[in-house]
Image (spheres, grey):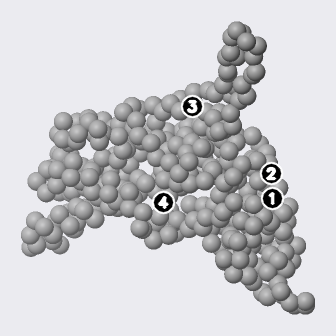
Amino acid sequence: MATLVTEYFKPAELTELSREIQADAERPADTNYRLQVDYLPEETTQDIDYRVRAGDNGIPSSAKFRAFDAEAHVGSRPGFTEVSGGLQPLGQRELITELDRLRIRKADAEAFRVELAKADRAATLATVVRMERAVAQTLLTGKTTLTNERGITQEADWGRKANRTVAAATQWTNADAADPIADLTAWQELVDREGTWVMSTPTFNLIRRTEAMRKLGSIAATGLASTVTTDFVRQTVSAYGLGTIDLYDAKFINEAGEEERILPVGKVLFVPNAGTGAAGRTVWGVTAEAMDPKYEIEESAWPGIVVGHYQNEHPKQDWVHASAIGFPVLANPDRTLAATVA
């Protein structure tokens, strides 16, 4: 049976370190898991359920003129609904094996603390990655699907309209015939909102190489450059009133031990601008561990990832356990769009 260990780090200390790791915005692009920060911004709840209001598109209703002494019109809020459901547990244990412990047996306690801190970081980022993958799937498909994952199979269908899943008129890999500006224009008209186009750098580079974009960037009467600059593409998209482009290149190591992009090459997301929360939220709730008195975590800090150090006597092993409960919530699904361009 595993025992909670507090000799090297108290759970509250490991949890505080975990929250700092999660909040670090200075990570390299390939480990900057920010869809859950920028586009479905994180929100905490002292609960195991989520409740958000859907249908708030930011456009007001209209009042009415009235006769003197007549009562004012009572406004209504058509389309407002409460979206609610259960949050799901997630997390990871990072093992410090019997052999690992033997290798540092001659070192002092500080060396073991360093190993525990490394394990804390690994377990925390693994948990963040799983949530990020869920957020990406939600934005790409309009659904959040868990299939036979550690005993759970569940699908949350957020009800996004079918026309919010689109494809380029001509794949952007066809540099001679593709017209990304025409595609982006058609898609933005469909959503009829300001927003941001999120794509990987390789997908963005497909735009740069299209003949249509190179013609826009050509100042010579004849002949075209083989590509245009990154700045030119961004400025052109903005000049056409199509919003901004956000390059997103976060990756994770999949079960085959290979690097995998969270947002695949050839996929483009259209989302409300970063920080608005107009599409929805990533909701983190309270785990059983957070409420455990042995963790000594203040109630205000219960929601979110919590971390503890455990030890097993036979075989002699230590591990750091990051535990969380949460779920992405696409409250206003039709504010988003997903396109296949390659």
Q: Nearer the viewer, residue 76 or 2?
A: 76
- The image position of residue 48, as x and y in percent, is 41, 32
Q: Residues within 10 Å of mark 4 (few under 14, many from 20)?
A: many
Extreme-front residue of the structure: 68
- The image position of residue 202, as x and y in percent, is 65, 73
Q: Which residue is mark 2?
A: 189
C-alpha span from label 4 to label 3:
25 Å
The reply to whether callout 1 and callout 2 are in contact (CB within 8 Å) is yes
For residue 185, the mark is 1
Q: Earlier in the sequence, mark 2 or mark 3?
A: 3
Type of the residue with mark 4: Tyr
Badge 4 marks a residue whose secondary structure is loop
Residue at the image position 9 percent from the left and 69 percent from the top: 108
Type of the residue with mark 1: Thr
Extreme-top residue of the structure: 69
Badge 2 marks a residue whose secondary structure is helix
C-alpha span from label 2 to label 4:
29 Å
Q: Residues within 10 Å of mark 3 (few under 14, many from 20)?
A: some
The reply to whether callout 4 and callout 1 are in contact (CB within 8 Å) is no
Q: Earlier in the sequence, mark 4 or mark 1?
A: 4
For residue 53, the mark is 3
Q: Which residue is mark 4?
A: 33
**In the image: residue 77, left or right of residue 64:** left
Q: Is residue 212 above or below residue 122?
A: below
The reply to whether callout 3 and callout 1 are in contact (CB within 8 Å) is no
Type of the residue with mark 3: Arg
